[in-house]
Amino acid sequence: MIQSGARCFSSWLLAGAVLACAGAPLAAQAADPVATQATGAFTLEITAPPEVQTLLVRHLELQRYRELNDLSDAELDRLLGAARQETQELLATLGYFSPVISIERTADAASTATRSVKLSVAPGEPSLVREVRIAFKGPISSDAAAQPQRQLIESSWALPVGRRFTQAGWDDAKRLALRQLTTLRYASGQLTQTLADIDPAQHSAQLSVTLESGPDYHLGALLVSGTQHHGDELVSRLARLTPGAEYAQADLTKAQQRLTASGYFDSAFIALDPAGDPLAAPLRVQVHEARLQKLVLGTGATTDAGLHLTAEHTHNQLPGIGWRAISKLLLDRDTQALGSELTAPPDENNWRWRTAARWVREPVGSFEVNSQQLVFGRSQTDEHIERHYYLQFDRSASVATDISAPDLAQALSANYAFTLRNFDQLPFPASGWGLGLEVGGGTTLSGTRDPYGRIVARWLGYLPLGQDSDSAARRAGRLVLRAQAGAVLASDSAALPSTQLFLTGGDTSVRGYAYQTLGVTLPDGEITAGRYLGIGSLEWQRPIVANNQITDWEGLLFIDAGAVADTPRELRARVGYGVGVRWKSPVGPLQIDLAYGVAVQRFRLHMNLGFTF
């Protein structure tokens, strides 16, 4: 409710129909008059400051009657009286409660087409918020555990003291407070009393709201509907909502995302039923299952591999075992790859059994390599962390251009890998970091059996140059730092598959060099994979601004350095630097970079789509 003197203004203030700004007061001078021509009853000319003028042109009811050919003078006079009242009401939505409104029209004429109406508005001084009172009733008012929630509602009130009162701002502030109440613990909360007390003489507004929390809700059982091929147990394990936990809408949203991201379901909706027992409120889960089988054909291009064709077949429930099978075929300019992965449904701790097989034919440095890989193990994936432990068999046959017989190498290893992600948002992070580590050990199987160890560490960090999230800070951009290091520890005579060694260069490593062309240079000039890897990158990303608005494009400057060698002291960095742009496309960040490779003294264009870490 809005109270002004002895009059009350509530929903008739056109809430939701008016665009109102809660910024600085309007300029004293009026904008140029806006005249709307009419072929029938009259013409209308509005003179007012820009914001008011726009409001009246869009919403003034008087404009609907301009085209009536049979509008009499008496009826026009009645409409002008109503227009004065309506103009006052419209200005009240912007916080102007003492406007000076002048309406003039030409004298009566024989032809109604010659009549004109001039509406002039001086809005006067706006009403500013002088006081805000937020009261709480119910368990939230006395529960010590709810104190952070009360503080959040109070500190983030969207129409604070000193701000110009507007109807839109008032409605938005109430909606935000109610959302902050009902999305955590108190699902049935409501606004029981609201009052905006306007004093036109003092140009001030006193605001008060009362939030009734209702009971503190905790999660109960899942009531699942929509399943056909997959049981309710799979939905429960993917949702991972613990019975007895405090209700938080954010947890329900994340559970929905886990269900849709799993690949088993095209859509999912989870809602708490506030009519149930607050101590164990049921959760209604509506899902729509994805097709059991699907085939996806695709094509694309990268600067590293040129045009590529892909085919991917998914079976979400293999007969007999119930595992998911994903088979992929990739064909591009240099590489042919075929692989299949079988994954079990998650257990109660979200661990899955996994096995995979892959065959790849690709250039590795100066060699053509046919490799096979078999993997068997378990994995666990959460929002911020992934864990994997597995056994892996690698076999590679390397053929140089001047050698007919392949160089065979085989190895068996046990491995553990984890990835931590702490980015603010994906797939377009602006701050945060990611850390990955792979540790493994095993033995070669070709010739003598030599033990070896392998470790790879990688890190990615986004450092905002501004101190907060306002527009000025975002325009300053951010620094992106990337590092990767790897080592294989084995005797000099150990015959290791190339899939266990390192090469670098390309779109996502050292720009300015072709894909996997940085490695160990042999005496005959050929390039082969090495046992040690080091990569570092520094990038400055800055939003591109057009018409004083931040766009979905960013410009950047970068420098990359990387090296591969068979011993640490032989590492010699190859440097690339350049400029580029990023576009926030609907399917992820599109990267276009022009890099100069210092060692090869030539420019190279790099393009890549998507964010991976």
Image: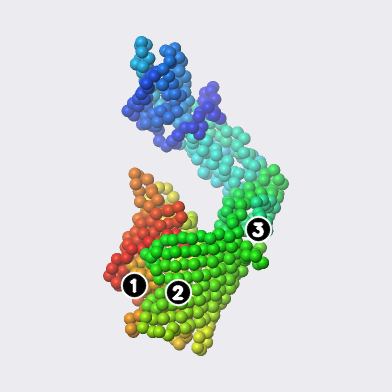
Badge 2: how crowded within 10 Å, few (<14), some, or many (20+)? some
Q: Which amino acid type is marked by label 2? A: Arg
Q: Which amino acid type is marked by label 3? A: His
Of labels 2 and 3, earlier in sequence is 3
Question: Count of labels shown?
Answer: 3
- SS of the residue under disc 3: loop
Query: Picture quarter containing residue 243?
Result: bottom right
134 shown above or below 56? below
**Percent from the top left, x then y, of residue 364?**
41, 75
Label 1 and label 2: CA atoms lie apart by: 27 Å
Q: Residue at x 49, y 27 (%)?
A: 199
Q: Please state which of residues 176 and 429 is positioned toward the viewer in this rendering.
A: 429
| Residue identifier under label 2 | 361
Picture colour scheme: rainbow
Label 2 and label 3: CA atoms lie apart by: 37 Å
Q: Residue at x 45, y 34 (%)?
A: 19
Query: In front of the other: label 1 or label 2?
Result: 2
Decide: marks 2, 3 in contact (CB < 8 A)?
no
281 shown above or below 557? above
Badge 1: how crowded within 10 Å, few (<14), some, or many (20+)? many
| Residue identifier under label 1 | 574
- SS of the residue under disc 2: strand
Figure quadrant of the N terminus: top right
- SS of the residue under disc 1: strand
Q: Please state which of residues 368 and 364 is positioned toward the viewer in this rendering.
A: 368
Q: Please state which of residues 23 and 337 is positioned toward the viewer in this rendering.
A: 337
* Disc on res. 230: 3
